[in-house]
Amino acid sequence: MDLLGQNNNTRVRPAYFIISGFIGIPNIKYFYVLLCFIYIVSVLGNSTVMIIIILDRNLRSPKYVAVFNLAFSDLFSNSALIPKVLDIFLFDHSVIPYDDCLAFLFFCFSSLSMQSLNLIALCYDRLVAIIFPLHYQAMVTHRFMLSLVASFWLYSMTVTLVSVGLLTRVSFCNSVVINSYYCDHGPMYRLGCNDITPNRVIGGLAPVLILWVPLVLILLSYCSIAYALSKISTAQERIKAFKTCTGHLSLVAIYFLPIMFVYLFGGTIHPNARIINLSLTAVVPSMLNPIIYVLQTQEIKVSFQKLCKFRRNLK
């Protein structure tokens, strides 16, 4: 089978790509065991949160539309990424067809992007609850939250489709070896030998649209929340109001701090270490998010305890 197949005079479309991200890293099989553990915990945790929200009528509020979607997108992203990564490297299936690679990129990137966008929805809920408590019922409705979540999915998928679409115009005549742990946009378009300027533009713009704009909006929201809390007369009431934000702040820290570390210091560490750090950054938040919400959100904690008590009574 030929490595490359030429569609026309200007574009060379490869029959397949080779994913080389973890190849050659010492003791990498221990890392695969860790990925298996992360995936199992992620499936159990996010499925539990989704089941609790579905079964408990007390959790049918608009806020939990965003919480449910966060659990769904976390489960979706890790399910799209981890099993395929294990198949590629653990079972030596590093050769992936061209179309499958683009599909792999689309599902991974769109679901991973939803994690940061979901944090905006949860932040909006906290912002309105603290700054406009009397108008909360009118401003945070089921229809609004469903529309917000749907618009975020459309936004994420649109950015991803543009990125994937621009890859189809790249001529891969230099190499088909992708130096990443999945079909990553940046390592892919850099293999091109024709004009990749549009890919460079979207490669620089996508992180801004998906990561840094949400982070700026969240930080501005918490500046407003902090200002509103400073106007509360007693320290006890300020602490009580702030405690309602701790779960969301934990999610923001777990998601954004590792990404910022990789962006700031990724160029100074070994390429193998950078690939491992990037892969953990993609999958660990999806594992930790449901644990944080079960432990720090009183309503879900109570519902979880009721569910466990109900199961024990059935036995």
Image (cartoon, grey):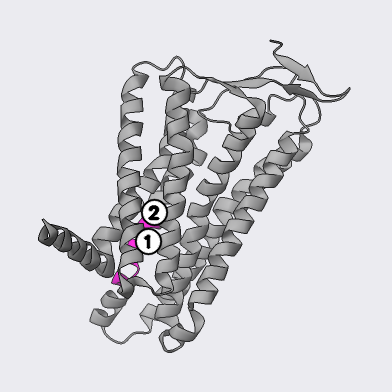
Please name the amino acid that badge 1 sits on: Leu
Question: Dot 2: few (<14), some (14–19), or many (≥20) neighbours within 10 Å?
Answer: few
> Spatial distance from mark 1 to mark 2, Cα to Cα?
6 Å
- Compare residues 35 and 248 and report the one nearer the observer: 35
Residue 281 placement (x, y as % from top left):
43, 40
The furthest residue to the bottom? 134
Residue 294 placement (x, y as % from top left):
27, 59
- Determine whether the residue tagged by mark 1 lies in a helix, strand or loop: helix
* Depicted 66 relative to depicted 17: above or below: below
Please name the amino acid that badge 2 sits on: Ala
Which contiguous range is marked in magenta?
A: 242-251
- The image quadrant where one finds the C terminus is bottom left
On residue 253, which mark appears? 2
* Depicted 166 relative to depicted 306: above or below: above
Residue 245 in the magenta stretch? The answer is yes
Q: Which residue is mark 1?
A: 249
Report if residue 221 is visible in the image: yes
Q: Quadrant of residue 172?
A: top right
Q: Residue at x 68, y 10 (%)?
A: 1
Residue 38 placement (x, y as % from top left):
33, 38
Chief secondary structure of the magenta span?
helix
- Determine whether the residue tagged by mark 2 lies in a helix, strand or loop: helix
Q: Left or right: where does residue 94 sit relative to residue 227?
A: right
Residue 89 in the magenta stretch? The answer is no
Q: Residue at x 68, y 42 (%)?
A: 163
Query: Pointers 1 and 2 in contact (CB under 8 A)?
Result: yes
- Compare residues 277 and 230 and report the one nearer the observer: 277
